[in-house]
Amino acid sequence: MTTKDIVLIALFAALTAAMGLFPAFNIPMIGVPITVQTFGFMLAGALIGAKRGALAMLLFVLLLAVGFPLLSGGRGGLGIFLGPSGGYILAWPLVAGLIGLLYSKLKQPTPWQEFLIMVAGGIVLEYAIGIPWVAVAAHLPLAKAALGSAAFIPGDIVKIVLAILIIRPVRRAFPGW
């Protein structure tokens, strides 16, 4: 691993932590907040690739686990992973890795291809891990957890569009990342 790799991994973990300064909006039915921090895994995967993006999010998750209050609202510690948000957060390294892998398959993706990449990682994979976790942690039937999680989809689509608007010029400016 090069110095550049280490710096980019730390930078994207720190960027994700900084996004925790924005206030969260809680969904009462399932107890999982809507935050800006999901931009972190989108940007990490798309901009620094599968391996480094996944490692950046793994670093972020490890910092949370040891108690750093990096989530929106100053939350951190092992208890986070036992609550309804735990599955979503634990999925972040996998999601960043998938997004990075899909980006690597397309040299110059169109905006629609980028949208589909983000949906595959940021919605499909994220929800596939997060929803069952919510069901278990919140003692809800899987269908009710899925229905409650559907409230996130419009916001996630907005975040995906905004992420693409950021990613496209940054990828042009820094093609070596």
Image: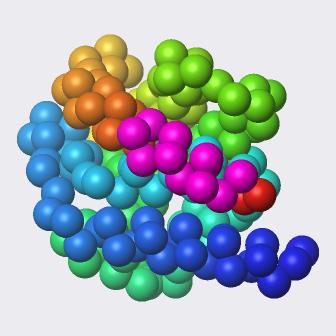
Magenta-span inclusion, residue 171: yes
Indicate the position of residue 68 as horizontal and vertical percent values. 42, 84
Query: What residue is rendered at 45% in x and 28% in y?
Result: 123
Colouring mode (rainbow / by chain / secondary structure / one colour): rainbow
Query: What residue is rendered at 33% in x and 21% in y?
Result: 146
Q: Is residue 71 left or right of residue 133?
A: left
Q: Which of the image's four quarters has the C terminus?
A: bottom right
Indicate the position of residue 130 as horizontal and vertical percent values. 45, 37
Q: Is residue 59 left or right of residue 5?
A: left
Q: Is residue 72 above or below residue 176?
A: below
Magenta-span inclusion, residue 174: yes
Q: Residue furthest right?
A: 1
Whether residue 18 can be seen here: yes
Indicate the position of residue 100 as horizontal and vertical percent values. 69, 42
Which one is nearer the viewer's eye here, 52 or 83? Answer: 52
Q: Is residue 54 above or below residue 155?
A: below
Which one is nearer the viewer's eye here, 7 or 34? Answer: 7
Query: What residue is rendered at 19% in x and 65% in y?
Result: 22
Q: Which of the image's four quarters has the N terminus?
A: bottom right
Q: Residue furthest front?
A: 173
Q: Is residue 61 left or right of residue 20?
A: right
Q: Is residue 5 above or below residue 54?
A: below
Q: How many marks?
A: 0
Q: Is residue 73 left or right of residue 115?
A: left
Indicate the position of residue 4 as horizontal and vertical percent values. 77, 77
The dominant secondary structure in magenta is: helix
Query: What residue is rendered at 63% in x and 66% in y?
Result: 56
Q: Which residues are magenta?
A: 164-175
